[in-house]
Image: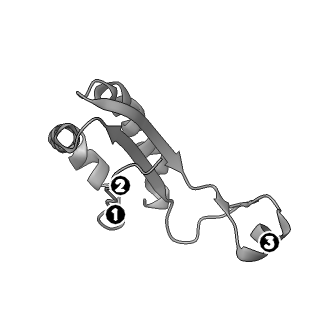
Amino acid sequence: MKPDKVEEFESIMNEAKPFLEERAGLLQLRLMKRGYKIDMEQIREGLPPVELTRIVKCVKYVLFWEFESKEDYGKAQKDLYETFWKRIDKCLIQPHDKYLGEAIF
């Protein structure tokens, strides 16, 4: 996300939240903003992550949706693209990553 578009993006997503929650088959919806970093030293020592204090290039977000079926996901993704996507896309530095899969546990 472009650093100067953070407020705009979060506003769009807050506006989109009720719309997204109405999608058929939705089990879970989360939007997370990266706010911490952790390295192997911290992991080995059991230390808490370090809060990010400045923006170097971009602000990273993860939109996590869980659906009953991949068909429900496909329809919801289409709905998002037809309604909010143009506004969201203007906030991005580059096209977003998409990670899709099946729940293990």
Which element type, helix, strand or loop, lies under badge 3? helix
User: Mark 3 or mark 1, which is nearer the start of the sequence?
Assistant: 3
Residue drawn 63% across the image and 55% down it: 35
Q: Residue 44 carries which label?
A: 3
x%, y% of residue 20? 31, 31
Lateral position of residue 101 relative to residue 33, left or right = left
Q: Mark 1 points at which residue?
A: 97
Examine the image and state in which quarter residue 19 appears: top left
x%, y% of residue 45? 85, 69
Q: Which mark is residue 52?
A: none
- Density class for disc 1 (Cα within 10 Å; few <14, some 14-19, many ≥20) is few
User: Mark 3 or mark 2, which is nearer the start of the sequence?
Assistant: 3
Looking at the picture, which amino acid does disc 2 mark? Cys
Quote the CA–CA distance across marks 2 and 3.
Answer: 37 Å
Lateral position of residue 88 relative to residue 11, left or right = left
- Density class for disc 2 (Cα within 10 Å; few <14, some 14-19, many ≥20) is some
Q: Which mark is residue 91?
A: 2
Looking at the picture, which amino acid does disc 1 mark? Asp
Q: Which residue lies furthest to the bottom in this view?
A: 41
Which element type, helix, strand or loop, lies under badge 2? loop
Residue drawn 75% across the image and 68% down it: 43
Q: In this view, does 97 lie above or below 39?
A: above
- Which marked residue is nearer to the observer: mark 2 or mark 1? 1
Residue drawn 21% across the image and 48% down it: 86
Examine the image and state in which quarter residue 54 appears: bottom right
